[in-house]
Amino acid sequence: MNKHDRRVKKTIKALQSALADAMLDKELQKITVQELVNKADIHRATFYSHYHDVYDLYEQMEHDAISEFTKFINDNPAGHYENIYNSIIDYIYENPALSRLLFFGKGIDHKFQEHMYDIIEEKYLEIWMQEENISSVSEEMLYMATYHIQGCLSIISLWIKNNFSTPKEKIIQLIYSIDASWNMP
């Protein structure tokens, strides 16, 4: 199986979309392979050529999202907060079904959100230390980072929950205005 083959990509995307749709209404443990293959319009054997079970499909989706998220956050060469949130919002906007799944899927532990927070916090603190020319993070900086990152992620979460009804440019502008009004300790 060649993961770069167009047909394989289409099949995987169909299965991922089927799982994302199903998890908005049902818990992961209540979703069957048969339900997914029916929705994706593929043969059951095709499913098993890619995944062991429904949990494997979900874990692979989460793993891929975390890897991609980590990559684009760490590849932010300019070290600007705005670039971080631009990248996040672009990723979420380009992957709406996956985003709904990772933020609101039923019966999952939401590890993705924890990883997302940790990655953003690490990048934020790295930028602050560079800007302030310091070598360690103070406790106050940790509190401020938590407050700021949780606030921004809450805005993004509400945007996803509201089915992206606000234009992404307005969400970016809102986060930028929060960033601009916020002073680092």
Image (tube, rainbow, N blue to C red):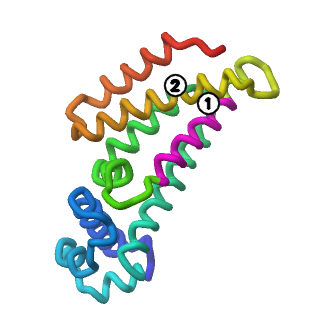
Residue 148's disc number: 2
Q: Which secondary structure class fits the magenta region best?
A: helix
Q: Residues within 10 Å of mark 1 (few under 14, many from 20)?
A: many
**Could you say where residue 144 lies in the image, as x and y percent from the top left?**
59, 22
Tell me the amino acid under the disc marked 2.
His
Q: What element carries label 2?
A: helix
Q: Nearer the viewer, mark 2 or mark 1?
A: 2
The x, y position of residue 124, in whole percent, is 61, 30
Residue 26 located left or right of residue 73: left
The residue where tag 1 is placed is 124
Q: Position of residue 40 (x, y in %)?
A: 21, 72
Residue 21 within the magenta-colored segment of the rendering? no
Boundaries of the magenta span: 111-126
The correct choice, above or below, for 166 with respect to 62 in the image is: above
Relative placement, left or right, of 151 versus 127 is left
Q: Which residue is drawn at 42% across and 15% down?
A: 177
Q: In which quarter of the image is the C terminus?
A: top right
Residue at the image position 31 percent from the left and 74 percent from the top: 7
Looking at the image, do the residues carrying marks 2 and 1 touch, with CB atoms under 8 Å apart? yes
